[in-house]
Amino acid sequence: MSSETRLRDDICRFGRSLFERGLTPGSSGNISVRLEDGWLVTPTNASLGFLDPTRLTRLDAQGRLVSGDAPTKEVPLHTALYETRGSARAIVHLHSTHSVALSMLPEIDPAAALPPMTAYYMMKCAPTALVPYYRPGDPAVADAIKGLAGKYSSVLLANHGPVVAGDTLEAAVFATEELEETAKLYLLLRGLNPRYLSPEQVKDLAKTFGLTLPEHGHEK
């Protein structure tokens, strides 16, 4: 089995898993994986639960269609994240309920959408940026992503959903799931004055696991 064939199967396998667990309904969400000479992406109007590996969109390095069905309208979003975050090899974009809800709250800090709630959120996702609302497929969202200058692997699109990059497809999927669970925790604990990780605990995580974490604007 070639590496591209394996990646096509992996996109379909992870897509089905995300769909079946209710993390992106209907035909929402999209997944891409970077190749040596272009990238694979899920087609437009396709449910992640029912993908056909032979019909996935293959684009060349310039984003032109090589084979497969027409690509998702969110190609500019993926392209901008790949261009600014050189380590990214895969991107997952979902319409997961709790992350979308989080993106709509008025108190969210655009530079740190979630406080340091758990060690695994800090290790896999933090920090998470919030960018303003743009209609799906609007090329302006690419400019917003480029404005983040590659500093974030996880981004919330306001009133839309999360976009998460990883150095592998598996890493991107797992980080997206961690972001969703942390958003759920935040909503459950909102207004209850929860105990977040202390600055010392965050520094210990950063030192132990080699993380680069800016200061968070949230207080205990």
Image (cartoon, rainbow, N blue to C red):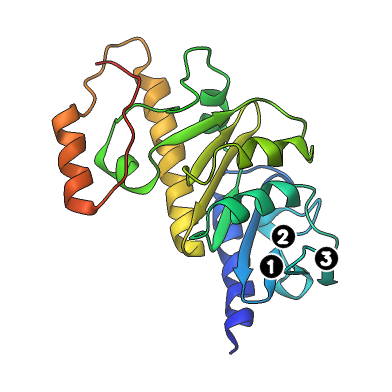
Q: Nearer the viewer, mark 3 or mark 2?
A: 3
- Closer to the camera, 88 or 135? 88
Q: Mark 3 to mark 2: distance in Å?
A: 14 Å
Q: CA distance from mark 3 to mark 1?
A: 11 Å
Q: Amino acid at mark 2?
A: Thr
**Quarter placement of the N terminus:** bottom right
Element assignment for label 1: strand
Q: Residue at x 34, y 34 (%)?
A: 214
Kindly report which numbered mark, 2 or 1, lies closer to the viewer in this rendering: 1
Across and down, in percent, residue 124 comes to 36, 48
Q: Amino acid at mark 3?
A: Arg
Q: Is residue 141 left or right of residue 55?
A: left
Neighbor class of circle 2 (other Cα within 10 Å; few <14, some 14-19, many 20+) is many
Q: Which residue in the structure is indicated by mark 1?
A: 40
Choose between 127 and 212: the one closer to the eye.
212
- Mark 2 to mark 1 CA distance (whole Å): 7 Å
Q: Position of residue 206 (x, y in %)?
A: 22, 44
Residue at figure coordinates x 30%, y 11% from the top left: 192
Q: Position of residue 189 (x, y in %)?
A: 34, 19
Q: Earlier in the sequence, mark 3 or mark 1?
A: 1
Can see residue 206?
yes
Q: Which residue is mark 3?
A: 64
What residue is disc 2 on? Answer: 42
Q: Amino acid at mark 1?
A: Leu
Density class for disc 3 (Cα within 10 Å; few <14, some 14-19, many ≥20) is few
Front tag of 3 and 1: 3
- Under tag 2, what secondary structure? loop
- SS label for mark 3: loop
**Residue 80 left/right relative to 84:** right
Where's residue 27, x and y in %?
74, 47
